[in-house]
Amino acid sequence: GDSVTQMEGPVTLSEEAFLTINCTYTATGYPSLFWYVQYPGEGLQLLLKATKADDKGSNKGFEATYRKETTSFHLEKGSVQVSDSAVYFCALSDRDTNAGKSTFGDGTTLTVKP
Amino acid sequence: EAQVTQNPRYLITVTGKKLTVTCSQNMNHEYMSWYRQDPGLGLRQIYYSMNVEVTDKGDVPEGYKVSRKEKRNFPLILESPSPNQTSLYFCASKDQGGNSPLHFGNGTRLTVT
């Protein structure tokens, strides 16, 4: 079956540091890829997505590129802020069925210190 | 405002006392789903529904029931809750198809004593 593996956390960075959270996947079909973010006390919300190979998703200074050859979708941000402290989930969705079932990684907790 | 609304946000109950967590979405989404989030286990799907009157088991359906009588509502029912169902629960909805992202509610923190 499909699976998503994220780098283990927690990750602690100083403000303005560079962020990378690694994500790799295995899928039987040709999935769409997503990053979701969960702020304390809230549900997950979409951060960015990419639906085909070499697509780059971007939002709020975060970027991730769909790399089919390495089955990866690493999340990056050039300069993190305290407000970026949250849990980040990598996910894939099967494009080839109407169900579009989503598979999530275990989440990576990011703490940014001033 | 487009949203998924869950109620209640917090619930403390005792073993065996039936409870229902409600979920409603106002985006006319056909697909709805329930997840539980536990430390170290990530998000696990309980049940999902692709349309009215169509529901199917996810990865961890034991001990739960759902119904989909209307498009907007997808309640989660625990007929006889047990302490191992203490968890954070999320309802989500989306358009059909793999390209569509999920829209999540704010969660229900359930404690079963």
Image (cartoon, coloured by chain):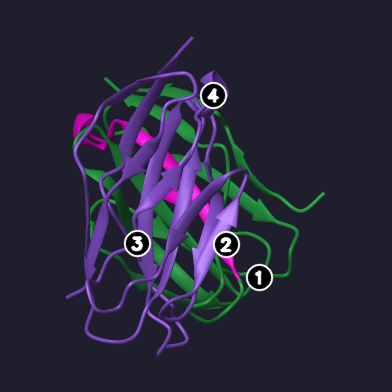
Chain colours: A purple, B green
Labelled disc at residue B93: 2
Would you name the residue on which mark 1 appears?
A: B29
- Residue B79 magenta: yes
Secondary element at image label 2? strand
Q: Is residue B110 above or below residue A74?
A: above
The chain ID associated with circle 1 is B
Identify residue type, mark 4.
Answer: Gln
Q: Quadrant of residue A27?
A: bottom left
Q: Residue at x 32, y 44 (%)?
A: A21
Q: Nearer the viewer, residue A73 or B107?
A: A73
Do callouts 3 and 2 mark residues in contact (Cβ within 8 Å)? Answer: no
Q: Residue at x 34, y 45 (%)?
A: B36
Pointer 2 local density, CA inside 10 Å: few below 14, some 14–19, many at least 20: many
C-alpha separation, residue under disc 2 versus residue under disc 4:
30 Å
Would you name the residue on which mark 3 appears?
A: A73
From which residue to which does the magenta span run? B76-94
x, y percentage for residue A3?
Answer: 21, 65
Pointer 3 local density, CA inside 10 Å: few below 14, some 14–19, many at least 20: many
Pointer 1 local density, CA inside 10 Å: few below 14, some 14–19, many at least 20: some
C-alpha separation, residue under disc 4 versus residue under disc 3:
22 Å
Identify residue type, mark 1.
Answer: His
